[in-house]
Amino acid sequence: MADRWAERTWPEHRVEGGAGPVVLVPVGSCEQHGPHLPLDTDTRVAVAVAEGAADRVAGRIGDTAVLVAPAVVYGASGEHQGFAGTVSIGTEALTTMLVELGRSLGDQCRLLVLVNGHGGNAAAVRTAVDRLRYEGRPVQAWSSGPAALGDVTSTGGPDRTDSHAGRIETSLLLALAPGLVRLDRAEAGTTEPLADLLPRMVAGGVGAVSANGVLGDPAGASAEEGAAILERLVEDLATMIVTAVGAVTEDRP
């Protein structure tokens, strides 16, 4: 079971002469995920990946602890604002929040990793990481997007038409929280490649290209596929942590 930052007492967080723990901060969103998935889908995935990776790297980075901090549950989701339930704080506010979190946590840890579960947060995460690194703080960012999935998606290969509330995310939620998936309401949205949709989405949000908020098709989703996808994401993050901790160690005098 993952070691959670918020479940420790303050004396348990004191570092006596060591380099401190690795701290993972899941960064999610509260936004529509079609008529069949919960609003906190991205947050649930980010937390699950962070906790899975924290467990996996135990023993692979010496005696350095890996802690999972409370998730950032609101993100930059303005493109989904036309759908009821979506709550967005925007890129500027999210950037400020991540920078301040990084400054607060950065003095207490060996390495800070922002584990991003929502593509709309990318600009804020990137800017926050750049600023924190400029200030000399050891920080990395990881995302659950195509780079982490590689060629292993729900269909066995890259699928640029499945980017939001389609088969991949539906499978992940069936593995993580099956009771929250309304399969009887699952339906395809637009199945055009994301690259073709972006100009219209930038101009009018997701609602301009998909009436039900789905970018892809959840048909064929299963808990088994979700578990396999989660495994790929967890291993990708765990590998990044081990590599990053090694680099931080080498940089220390």
Image (cartoon, rainbow, N blue to C red):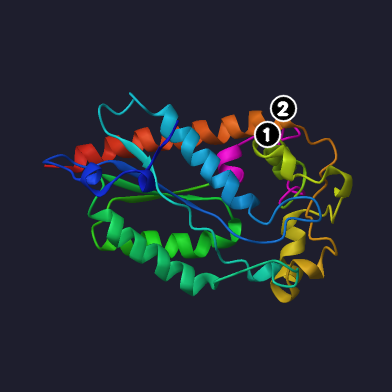
Residue 147: image quadrant is top right
Q: Amino acid at mark 2?
A: Glu
Judge from the rendering whether residue 155 lies leftward or rightward of residue 17; answer left or right. right
Give residue 242's position: percent from left, percent from top: 36, 33
Judge from the rendering whether residue 219 lies leftward or rightward of residue 117; answer left or right. right
Instruction: Give the residue at x 47% y 73%.
Output: 93
Evaluate whether residue 143 shows in this view.
Answer: yes
Q: Say above or below: 209 vs 112.
A: below
Task: Give the residue at the far top of this rendering.
Answer: 59
Residue 87: image quadrant is bottom right
Q: Say above or below: 246 vs 213.
A: above
Depth order, front residue of 84/123: 84
Q: Decide which of tag 1 and tag 2 comes sooner along the chain.
A: 1
Instruction: Give the residue at x 84% y 56%.
Output: 190
The residue carrying mark 2 is 224
Label 2 near label 1: C-beta < 8 Å?
yes
Depth order, front residue of 176/113: 176
Judge from the rendering whether residue 77 lies leftward or rightward of residue 18; answer left or right. right
Q: Kindly state the secondary structure of the residue where label 1 is placed.
A: helix
Instruction: Give the residue at x 77% y 47%.
Output: 166
Q: Which residues are magenta?
A: 144-163
The dot on residue 175 is 1
Mark 2 closeness class: few <14, some 14–19, many ≥20 residues within 10 Å: some
Give residue 237's position: percent from left, percent from top: 47, 37
Q: Amino acid at mark 1?
A: Ala
